[in-house]
């Protein structure tokens, strides 16, 4: 009995000691928390002069556009070119019905015979100068009329360029639209963009800009601002800007997709590593954890340009702040952290 009693007393003492130790640990969680603090890496960020590059979607247009159409409605006999064909100045493009021209030619020949007869009669004293003058006026008018009709019977290209539109087929009667449109693609083409109202004061005529085309990946082109339109589009609050770009070999064609990049000066803004930026799922918002002592704050940021492996920050982080660049998965606003040395 004495042995059993002693054993029971020892077990009870051990149990009380264990309970007391557990209660003390629960009352002082700092030791446990210290072992479980999120470990992060940090970096100190600074402000620097960031080039302000702005990219605009561009529409490519021909330097000049010529609409090929007759002066008066007529029926089309043949069209010698298709859209995309290159044409040269003076090349015959369209032939129209010649019925009117044939009739005018017959009338001109009749007037010429009457005029010549009147001149002969005047020379032998059997005619009058008045009759000759009247026929001469009629002859000049008939020739002018025939020439005008002939010019509108065979339509030629006034420029070197490319056929950009065809609106009729042989047999059609011409109407309000041109038969063909020819665009001049050399020595340069126009690149049309719409510039934001806030950026317009920084755009200058004669400024050099970079141009890229999806059709020519890896190639950089240079253009020059040639015209700034003075009226704003009330629906988009943008101004149209024209950029001229040299087009040797006529590689750049109307309708191509391009981008124009403007250099709009520099701004002194904070730059943070891209590893510091956290994207909030489902919202598109961007955040950066900023270290204050041994705790972090969850700062929403507005990003500007991406610069290699960093981002320009327009707001949300100050010059000289310490930001978390790794270990963000266990963080939340106000969480205590351990900084990896």
Image (cartoon, rainbow, N blue to C red):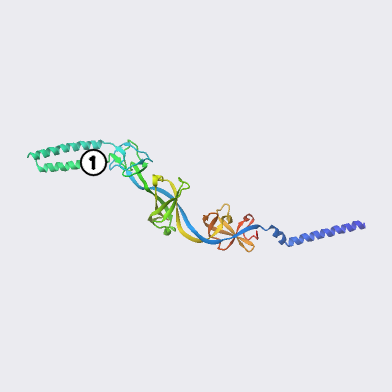
Which residue is farthest left? 125
Name which quarter of the figure residue 230 lies in: bottom left
- Please tell me how crowded label 1 is: few (under 14), some (14-19), or many (20+) other residues with Cα within 10 Å: some
Q: Which of 76 and 309 is in front in this view?
A: 309
Residue, disc 1: 147
Q: In this view, does 337 lie to the left or right of 112?
A: right
Q: In this view, does 23 lie above or below 260?
A: below
Q: Can residue 241 be seen in this view?
A: no
Residue 149, given in percent of the width and then of the height, sits at: 25, 40
Residue 27, given in percent of the width and then of the height, sits at: 74, 62
Name which quarter of the figure residue 290 lies in: bottom right
Q: Residue at x 48, y 60 (%)?
A: 266
Q: Is residue 302 left or right of residue 100?
A: right
Determine whether the residue tagged by mark 1 lies in a helix, strand or loop.
Answer: helix
- Quarter containing the C terminus: bottom right
Q: Is residue 22 left or right of residue 178?
A: right
Q: Can residue 101 be seen in this view?
A: yes
Q: Is residue 119 left or right of residue 93?
A: left
- Quarter containing the N terminus: bottom right
């Amino acid at each position: 009995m004495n042995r059993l009693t002693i054993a029971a007393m020892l077990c009870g003492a051990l149990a009380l000691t264990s309970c007391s130790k557990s209660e003390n640990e629960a009352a002082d969680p700092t030791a446990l928390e210290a072992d479980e603090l999120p470990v992060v890496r940090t970096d100190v960020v600074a402000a620097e002069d960031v080039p302000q590059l702005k990219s605009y979607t561009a529409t490519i247009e021909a330097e000049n556009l010529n609409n090929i159409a007759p002066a008066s409605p007529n029926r089309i006999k043949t069209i010698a070119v298709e859209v995309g064909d290159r044409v040269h100045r003076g090349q015959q493009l369209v032939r129209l019905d010649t019925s009117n021209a044939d009739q005018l030619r017959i009338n001109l020949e009749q007037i010429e015979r009457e005029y010549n007869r009147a001149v002969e009669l005047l020379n032998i004293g059997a005619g009058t100068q008045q009759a000759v003058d009247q026929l001469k006026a009629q002859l000049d008018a008939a020739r002018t009329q025939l020439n005008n009709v002939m010019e509108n019977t065979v339509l030629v290209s006034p420029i070197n360029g490319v056929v950009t539109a065809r609106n009729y087929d042989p047999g059609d009667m011409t109407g309000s639209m041109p038969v063909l449109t020819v665009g001049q693609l050399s020595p340069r083409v126009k690149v049309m963009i719409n510039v934001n109202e806030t950026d317009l004061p920084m755009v200058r005529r004669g400024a050099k800009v970079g141009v890229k085309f999806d059709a020519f990946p890896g190639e950089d082109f240079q253009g020059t601002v040639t015209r700034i339109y003075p009226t704003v589009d009330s629906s988009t609050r943008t101004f149209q800007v024209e950029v001229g770009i040299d087009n040797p070999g006529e590689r750049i064609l109307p309708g191509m997709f391009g981008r124009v990049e403007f250099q709009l000066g520099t701004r002194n803004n904070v730059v943070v590593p891209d590893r510091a930026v956290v994207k909030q799922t489902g919202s598109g918002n961007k955040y950066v954890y900023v270290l204050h002592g041994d705790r972090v704050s969850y700062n929403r940021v507005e990003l500007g340009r991406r610069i290699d492996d960093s981002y320009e920050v327009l707001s949300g982080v100050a010059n000289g702040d310490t930001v978390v660049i790794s270990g963000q998965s266990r963080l939340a606003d106000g969480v205590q952290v351990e900084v990896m040395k």
